[in-house]
Amino acid sequence: MLEKAIQLTPFDRISPTELKKFDRVYIGSNFCSNLIPKISDIIRLKDLGVKNITVSTPFLTDNDFNKTIKLIKESLKIISKIEISANDIGLIDKIKEIKGLDILLARPISHDWLRMNPKSLKKFLKRFRIKYVETDEEYMVKRFKDAKINFSFHYPLEYLSMSRICPFERKINDALCEYRCLNKNIVELKETGRKDVIYLKNNAYFKKNIPVKTKNIKRTVLFYYGQKI
Amino acid sequence: MNIQVGVGSFKELEFFLKEGAREFYCGLSYIPSHVEGTSNFKNIYEIIKADRIIKKEKKNFFFTANEIDSSAFKKTIDAILKLHENGIDGFIIKDLSLLEEIKNKKIRPFLILSTLSMCLNSKTALFYKKNYRIKRIALCEQITPEESKKIIEIAETEVFLKHRESCRNFNGLCFLSCHGPKTTPCLKTYNETFTMPGFSREENLKHLYRYYKYGTKILKIGRSPLGELSRVIFFEAKNILNILKNSKNEEEFLKHSLKFTKEYDKVYKKLSVKYGFIC
């Protein structure tokens, strides 16, 4: 059965009734290190009755790496089973043996891995105990439809680009963040004289996509940006 | 700190050898290597010939294969084996599956982890070092020298002359419609006033000073699709290294290098008009 999930940042507030429409909640960000959740965010979700939690993590500097390991260890004291959506190969390698942990290969690094030859890809997914490959690329999902690789599909925003120099703060992510991105959930960027739109959310740029239905998609993940659910 | 420069022809190689570059790297048009439209040697035999010229000068030569493309996997590994057999110093690699295949072939070339590999922390650096004998890491453009310190302790490192050659967003994981220096969506203005942020020139030069102090060994000049541009960047890099070596402190380096790079802006401006790229 297709699992339905929602992706939240630690600052998103949606009602418990709306949360109940989903089988799973992703918390954090695969793009911004200032949006790595705190243990209190995990506790809050647990208190709201969320049973299945995925922690989204970005590329990590040494400082963020240690914070993330600490978060994982603390989370496992509170809930017996947790998923980590990870980009950083150092992190994936470090946590692959931890019990009670499922690992997802996150966007945008999954974009690269999906361009490997399928034989190598399968080998790496097995070696690192990766449960699902996270993607937003319809083309790649269809390409692998017979390869026995399972995906979770993110929508309605398909990743285009990201920066550690925050487009809202205009400074690097490791600096003290004033979370200016939260004042505007999503910004439509249009180049003068052109029709196509780029969407800016936190520190990453996207275009719109729609969920696809294929047998290897085991989960859809709605990227929450303040829209009506 | 020494300069490594990308070359795509014997003419370029001769020029940069004469001008004192310490290391060289190149690609082949049929092996994916990230830069669109850049000049490449015609075939493996030209690269082997170029390697012999470089070896005579006791300098180093690397081959880059730093883009993932499953359809080119076999061609890529065949090229690597052939070049290794013929004595090329090493390879610049991004793809895990390619690193794994090199390991399986039981060859031990000097491996440089491409800047596109997103190695942002020392644990990841160690992962690559332990599993794939990575000797050097091209530091990700999006981290600071302070964030790189532990990586620099683990492996040799190299950096680009970032105030001239760096992407605003994560290079290698940017899928904006960019096809070389004439399109660059990251440098355009959106909604009349919005531009995608990057490090300022001052920050980039400050970074260079600190990378130098922390022990980064190589300043890298990319393979530009416009040969003339590579030469200008090379001369700028050479002069900046001189300022770096002769500055008493960071403040002095910044003062002189900022003034110097502003002079170079005029040259880039002329080239941008000539070739139509965004500067």
Image (spheres, coloured by chain):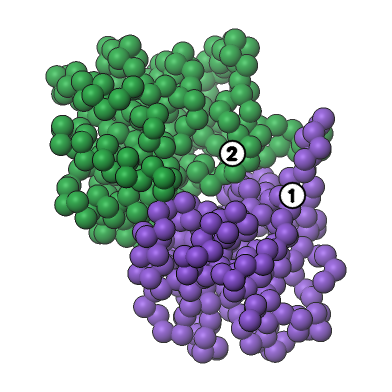
Chain colours: A purple, B green
Name the spot of residue A19 as percent of width and height, x first: 75, 80
Q: What residue appears at the point 41 percent right and 48 percent down from the top-left corner?
A: B70
- B59 relative to A128 in the view: left or right: left
Q: In this view, does B150 lie above or below A229?
A: above
- B232 relative to A33 in the view: left or right: left
Which quarter of the rendering shows the C terminus of chain B?
top right
| Labelled pair 2, 1 in contact (Cβ < 8 Å) | no
Q: In this view, does B117 lie above or below B270?
A: below
Q: In this view, does B248 lie above or below A36?
A: above
Name the spot of residue A78 as percent of width and height, x first: 55, 89
Disc sitting over residue B168 in the figure? 2
Name the spot of residue B74 as percent of width and height, x first: 32, 45
Q: Which residue lies furthest to the front in this view?
A: A146
Between B172 and A171, the one lying in front of the other is B172
Q: Dot 1 falls on which chain?
A: A
Q: Quadrant of residue A198?
A: top right
Between A9 and B1, the one lying in front of the other is A9
Q: What residue appears at the point 34 percent right and 54 percent down from the top-left corner?
A: B97
Disc sitting over residue B111 in the figure? none
Q: In which quarter of the image is residue B56?
A: top left
**Residue tagged 1:** A199
Mark 1 nearby-residue class (10 Å; few <14, some 14–19, many ≥20): some
